[in-house]
Image: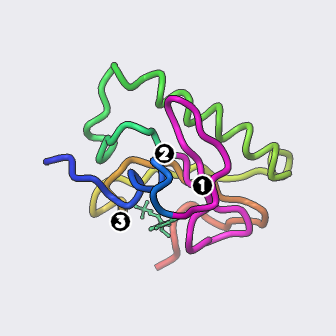
Amino acid sequence: MTAEETIFSKIIRQEIPATLLYQDDLVTAFRDIQPKAPTHILIVPNKLIPTVNQVTSDDELAMGRLFTVARKLAEQEGIAEDGYRLIVNCNRHGGQEVYHLHMHLLGGEPLGGLLPQA
Ligand code: 5GP
């Protein structure tokens, strides 16, 4: 797979608007444009990694940072105690739409079962 830039690279470089919540040398976090829960944040490595299938050991620091930033943002959003869900979709069967790896942080209400009921 060729690593083609997505809209997320432009958000990371702040070339197009997004509600940015956090940015450092490794990751950027911003609100999802179509929230599926009261809190719906995307946490994205600054480096373009299309899917989990392209993650290498060189990316371990950035992948760990996704979790520490998720924890901080969950606290900041006031959802840490009630709980939340972290999701990383991969490819077609995972329902991935944007091919720049990202972690969804969802919370603010009971989220129901893990998968949509058929
Ligand atoms: P995926 O299905 O790939 O795991 O999730 C992609 C997410 O990116 C979706 O929840 C979608 O609403 C969000 N999204 C797509 N385009 C944009 C955008 O331009 N800005 C923001 N903030 N979110 C986006």
Q: State if disc 1 and disc 2 touch (CB < 8 Å).
A: yes
Q: Residues within 10 Å of mark 2 (few under 14, many from 20)?
A: many
The magenta-colored residue range is 17-43
Circle 3 SS class: loop
10 w.r.t. 76: above or below: below
Q: State if disc 3 and disc 1 touch (CB < 8 Å).
A: no
Residue, x 64% and y 62% (percent of image)?
Answer: 40
Q: Earlier in the sequence, mark 2 or mark 1?
A: 1
- In the picture, measured across the screen, residue 74 lies left or right of residue 41, that is right
Q: Residues within 10 Å of mark 3 (few under 14, many from 20)?
A: few
Pinpoint residue 43: horizontal percent, then vertical percent: 55, 47
Q: Please state which amino acid type lies under the numbered disc 1.
A: Phe
Outermost residue, left direction? 1
Pinpoint residue 113: horizontal percent, then vertical percent: 61, 65
- Label 3 belongs to which residue? 97
Task: Residue 44: give its label.
Answer: 2
Q: Nearer the viewer, residue 82 or 79?
A: 79
- Label 1 belongs to which residue? 30
The verdict on label 3 being within 8 Å of ligand 1 is yes
101 w.r.t. 10: above or below: above
Quarter residue 99 falls in: bottom left
